[in-house]
Image: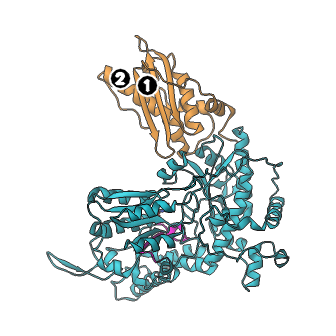
């Protein structure tokens, strides 16, 4: 396997910095149109089939009259083009002024902002129909129960689960993974068994398995990464064939590099060995269309707060066949069928895994969030983010001394851009960007093994979502340049 | 908006004073800031009157943590251990100048925390009247 260098996406021969946003956008588009191959993966990148918003580049003549390719494509398909300025009006927080500048929120991989619809629904719940679910026989309890179960159904439709009973409400991705480790893991993993992970996992998809492995005497095997942030497929095959592997657990989209992993292929290979697969979809479900039946994964975890929903609510999807065999995770009210002094029986899933009073308002808010992103359309969201990511790579790539980590081709990755500038520490960079009203994340992004693989202690990470626009990317690029001037890079 | 990253901070970051180690240091402490991954190590060599004869720091991390550590070494040189004990966070912040957010305060004060831990360990080992280091 060829080990390639991490992308130092160019130390540049930057032309005179044009701070003028419009000129920058125009010149970027001109350059992109001149290079029709720009969005096509290089032969060196894995041949992941990405659901593209548009089938290849359109001819220049087709695009005429439209500012962007996406708008032209939308026109051809008879759809409204994605209107980011309209979307921005849905997010009250974007009106905030930080240090004298409008907030440019570029930390959506950590948590996203909330649209008015979601905020209003939470208020409406508490004002009008707050009650415990599945318990009261009175009107508002029935309303709350209906809204709670409707949210579950919406989520099932969003990810194409076979039934809402495969959707378990949890606190977030972290709890979903812990649930699988504790319930499924303690039942199915024993002495000498192996679990396959990857070097790009978030701590929440590492630590629960370490705890389990220690308790059961199992061992962890890691799939390594190429220098441009893709999984080394041969590593995976080798681990899988080494025998005794009981589970594969991997992230769908890297929260640091934006790499989109070919999960479908990995699931297929794992299943051939009779090995189930858990997918950490914290960074995929909010951003790209995800279909659990197409992926055929056994478990899938994601967080509501990363997709316009409230904090404290998330989802574990698990195949019905798995759920039936799994023991409860927490014991308590609501999950039982009958309780006797020395023994109890459980309800069927999902209730078997939802002990006690759950985050009812959160689930209802998440239901609204699912409505919101579904209305925008996940393909549109993906297309919008891809355009911004390409634009960001283009603008940032020209900054002298910058190093962008992960896949070289922004057209193949999600909207996460991790970088370092010269010897400027990521925290200093984030503080300098904050002075310009720009919110980014800095540090190890809960992925220390990945940082080690990259050979850095930290990176600065900008991540985009439905409400970000090119102007904000321009501000980011200008502010990074300013940091470069201050630090004399 | 004026930046916290003054010429002085950058100068100490790029050209740290008193960086290195002291094999014969009596006071030696190290700590990290788990949030940023900043690491600071402080070593103080004392003479027979408990005066700081030499001091070195080592570490890695952001400009604020490393520059403040370097500045702090200059402040303690020639002081008695008791005077070092009395250095306050205001003293350190005035060296840095500028307005820091709560999160970045931890970076700025990491070296002082390390220094105090070392000093209190030393006082504890030579003197029974050990006090707890003030919470930073
Ligand atoms: C890839 C990935 N997995 C898991 C998590 C953990 O999500 P949560 O903190 O919502 O449980 C995150 C979020 O930081 C993530 O990006």
Q: Residues within 10 Å of mark 1 (few under 14, many from 20)?
A: some
Q: Residues within 10 Å of mark 2 (few under 14, many from 20)?
A: some
Quarter of the image with the N terminus of chain A is bottom right
What's the chain of the residue with tag 2?
Answer: B
Place of residue A366 in the rendered image (x, y in percent of width and height, measured from the top left): 50, 75
Residue A30 in which image quadrant: bottom right
Quarter of the image with the C terminus of chain A is top right
Q: Is residue B99 above or below residue B119?
A: below
Place of residue A285 in the rendered image (x, y in percent of width and height, measured from the top left): 53, 72
Instruction: State which chain is coloured orange.
Output: B
**Front residue (pair B17, A101):** B17
Residue under circle 1?
A: B85
Residue A473 in which image quadrant: bottom right
Give the residue at x 63% y 77%. Answer: A379
**Front residue (pair A434, A209):** A209
Q: Secondary structure at mark 1?
A: helix
Numbered range of the magenta stretch: A295-311
Q: Are marks 2 and 1 in contact (CB under 8 Å)?
A: yes
Place of residue A262 in the rendered image (x, y in percent of width and height, measured from the top left): 54, 69
Give the residue at x 62% y 64%. Answer: A413
**Front residue (pair B55, A358):** B55
Chain A is shown in which shade? cyan
Q: Is residue A431 above or below residue A82?
A: above
Residue under circle 2?
A: B123
């Amino acid at each position: 396997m060829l080990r390639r260098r991490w992308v130092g996406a160019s130390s540049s021969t930057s032309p005179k910095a044009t701070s003028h946003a419009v000129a920058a956008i125009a010149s970027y588009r001109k350059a992109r149109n001149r290079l029709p191959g720009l969005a096509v993966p290089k032969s060196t990148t894995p041949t992941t089939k990405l659901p593209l918003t548009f089938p290849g580049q359109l001819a220049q003549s087709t695009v005429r009259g439209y500012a962007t390719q996406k708008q032209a494509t939308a026109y051809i398909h008879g759809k409204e083009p994605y209107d980011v300025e309209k979307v921005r009006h849905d997010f009250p927080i974007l009106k905030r002024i930080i240090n004298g500048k409008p907030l440019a929120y570029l930390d959506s991989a950590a948590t996203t902002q909330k649209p008015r619809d979601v905020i209003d629904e939470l208020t409406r719940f508490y004002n009008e129909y707050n009650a415990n679910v599945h318990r009261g026989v009175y009107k508002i309890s029935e309303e709350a129960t209906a809204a709670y179960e409707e949210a579950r159904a919406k989520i099932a439709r969003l990810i194409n689960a076979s039934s809402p009973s495969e959707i378990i409400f949890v606190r977030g991705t972290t709890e979903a993974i812990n649930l699988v480790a504790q319930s499924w893991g303690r039942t199915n993993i024993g002495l000498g068994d192996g679990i396959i992970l990857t070097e790009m996992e978030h701590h929440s998809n590492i630590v629960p398995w370490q705890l389990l492995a220690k308790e059961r005497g199992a061992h962890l095997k890691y799939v390594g990464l190429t220098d441009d942030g893709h999984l080394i497929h041969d590593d995976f095959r080798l681990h899988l064939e080494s025998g005794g592997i009981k589970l594969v657990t991997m992230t769908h989209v890297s929260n640091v590099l934006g790499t989109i992993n070919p999960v479908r292929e990995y699931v297929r290979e794992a299943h051939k060995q009779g090995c189930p697969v858990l997918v950490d979809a914290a960074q995929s479900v909010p951003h790209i269309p995800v279909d659990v039946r197409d992926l055929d994964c056994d478990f899938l975890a994601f967080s509501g707060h990363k997709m316009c929903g409230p904090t404290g609510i998330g989802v574990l999807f698990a195949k019905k066949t798995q759920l039936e065999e799994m023991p409860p995770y927490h014991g308590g009210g609501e999950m039982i069928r009958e309780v006797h002094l020395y023994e109890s029986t459980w309800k069927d899933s999902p209730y078997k895994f939802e002990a006690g009073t759950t985050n009812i308002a959160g689930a209802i808010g998440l239901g609204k969030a699912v409505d919101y992103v579904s209305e925008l359309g996940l393909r549109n969201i993906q297309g919008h983010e891809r355009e911004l990511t390409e634009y960001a790579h283009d603008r940032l790539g020209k900054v002298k001394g910058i190093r962008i980590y992960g896949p070289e081709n922004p057209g193949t990755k999600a909207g996460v851009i991790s970088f370092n500038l010269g010897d400027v520490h990521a925290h200093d960079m984030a503080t300098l960007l904050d002075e310009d009203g720009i919110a980014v994340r800095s540090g190890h992004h809960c992925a220390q093994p990945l940082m080690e693989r990259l050979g850095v202690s930290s990176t600065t990470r900008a991540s985009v979502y439905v409400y970000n626009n090119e102007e904000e990317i321009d501000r980011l690029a200008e502010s990074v340049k300013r940091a470069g001037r201050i630090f004399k890079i | 908006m004026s930046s916290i990253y003054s010429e002085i901070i950058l100068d100490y970051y790029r050209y740290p004073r008193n960086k290195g180690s002291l094999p014969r240091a009596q006071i030696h402490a190290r700590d990290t800031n788990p949030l940023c991954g900043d690491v600071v190590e402080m070593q103080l060599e004392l003479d027979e009157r408990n005066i700081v004869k030499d001091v070195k720091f080592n570490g890695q991390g952001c400009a604020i943590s490393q520059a403040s550590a370097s500045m702090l070494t200059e402040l303690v040189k020639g002081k008695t251990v008791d005077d070092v004990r009395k250095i306050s966070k205001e003293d350190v912040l005035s060296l840095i100048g500028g307005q820091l957010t709560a999160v970045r305060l931890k970076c700025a004060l990491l070296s002082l925390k390390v220094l105090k831990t070392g000093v209190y360990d030393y006082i504890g080992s030579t003197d029974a009247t050990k006090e707890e280091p003030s919470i930073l």
